[in-house]
Each structure stands twice: as structure tokens, then as C-alpha cells.
Image (spheres, helix red, strand yellow):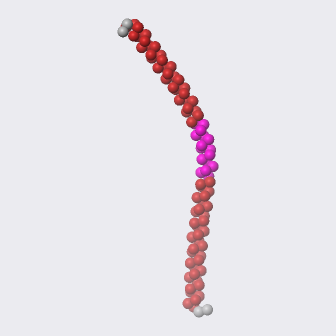
Amino acid sequence: MNKEQTNTLKQQIQTNDQDYSEQKQRKEALEKQLEALTTDVSGHEETEESLQKQIATLTEKKMICNSNYMKSDKSAIVCIKKLVKKMKI
């Protein structure tokens, strides 16, 4: 093997080492992304359940508010009717 062939092989080895290193880094980055996605999905299920509870609570509060509003609305109407009777309009 002559010196030129040896240099060529050394360059190929360096190139292969560099390619291997880059591929390894890409693999590690993809594994981290996959792990993050997997974590997000499992967290999403918990969040979805939590959101359903929040929706139920807010719906209940809305119903109470609507009920109280209707009560106050009715009392306002009663007051207006009493005023109208007093004024005999």
C-alpha cells in the first residue's frame, strides 16, 4: 500500500467517524423528542380529565348564576309592578 492510498483511507476513516458522530447526535435528539412527545401525551390525558372537571364545575356555577339572575330579575319586575300600582300609571 502506498502513501497516497494510506492517506485516502485515513480520510475515509475520519469522514466515517464524523458521519457516525453526527448520526449518533441525531439519534439522541430524536430520542429526546420522542420522550418529550410521550410525556406530553400522558400529561394530556390528565389535563383532559382535569378540564372535564373544570367544565362541570363552571357549568354548575353558570346554572347557579343564571338561577340567581332570574330571581333578581323577577324581584325587579315585582318592584316595578308595585311602583306602577302606587303611581297608578
Location of the N terminus by quadrant is bottom right
Q: Is residue 40 above or below residue 23?
A: above
Q: Is residue 59 above or below residue 85?
A: below
Q: Residue 20 is drawn in which quadrant?
A: bottom right
Residue name at image x 58 percent, y 67 percent: 25
Residue name at image x 61 percent, y 48 percent: 43
Q: Magenta stretch: residue 53 in it?
A: yes
Residue name at image x 48 percent, y 17 percent: 74
Q: Viewer-proximal residue, 29 or 44?
A: 44
Question: Magenta region, mostly helix, strand or loop?
Answer: helix
Location of the C terminus by quadrant is top left
**Spot occupied by residue 22 in the image (x, y as percentages of width and height):** 57, 70
Q: Viewer-proximal residue, 75 or 28?
A: 75
Which span of residues is magenta-colored? 39-54
Q: Residue 21 is drawn in which quadrant?
A: bottom right
Residue at far bottom of view: 2
**Spot occupied by residue 88 in the image (x, y as percentages of width and height):** 37, 7
